[in-house]
Amino acid sequence: EVQLQESGPGLVKPSQSLSLSCFVTGYSITRSYRWNWIRKFPGNKLEWMGYINSAGSANYNPSLKSRISITRDTSKNQFFLQVNSVTTEDTATYYCARSGDYGYTFDYWGQGVMVTVSS
Amino acid sequence: DVQMTQSPSNLAASPGESVSINCKASKSISKYLAWYQQKPGKANKLLIYSGSTLQSGTPSRFSGSGSGTDFTLTIRNLDPEDFGLYYCQQHNEYPLTFGSGTKLEIK
């Protein structure tokens, strides 16, 4: 069974970078599908942030494009999110999720990791 | 970006009842609307995609309808396991966007 698990620091200071990892088991991230980051703000709004595909190419939400980077380590079957210059507005629960190359729906999700941006 | 307007924000119902949740897109998304269930401590679950296609494992008491800009999720004969937070998501174009969520609670 496909499983995704996020990890990373729960607290980040304003102006610093936020870095999260998603470890995938049960499926190789180089085989197929798109590997996404999504976040849920306090108040329940969900925002799709971007993905990295099985070939290693990334696509980002234009609202975040200048501040984020999604990369991967194929040897560990992990992918990563980096958000630069964070503010309190980046406080959210961050999820990694798998989506199809054509269907664009998220069929497997991690349980999420809460990140607070505060000094 | 396609804006998704979801209603109601909150919904209370009793087991055995039926409920409907609506989602409206700011422009036509054809049939490409998905529904998700979110519960504390569990991974989010894809229930329905392409407007009305049940994801494998989704109980038949869930159904989806609509096309273009207006969509509905209906849950018949509510089970206690169905209570939680529900989201719609358009999967027609990037950036992918979500509705604001509907909290379904036990009355």
Image: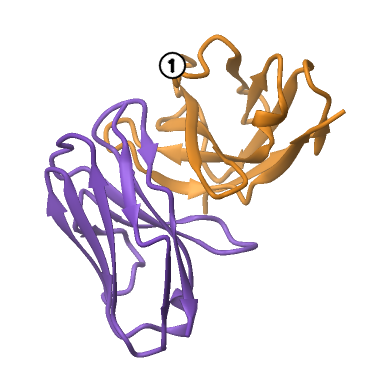
Chain colours: A orange, B purple
Q: Amino acid at mark 1?
A: Pro
Residue at image point 35% right, 36% down? A100
Residue at image point 23% right, 34% down? B92
The residue tagged 1 is A62
Circle 1: is it few (<14), some (14-19), or many (20+) Cα within 10 Å? few
Compared with B34, B9 (above or below) is below
Compared with B97, B14 (above or below) is below
Residue furthest top as drawn: A66
Compared with B67, B53 (above or below) is below
Identify which residue, A8 or A1, lies in the foreground.
Answer: A8
Q: Position of residue A54 (x, y in %)?
A: 45, 24
Identify which residue, B51 or B57, lies in the foreground.
Answer: B51
Residue at image point 44% right, 75% down? B82
* Element carrying mark 1: loop
Q: Position of residue A67 (x, y in %)?
A: 60, 13
Number of marks in the image? 1
Quadrant in which the N terminus of chain B appears: top left
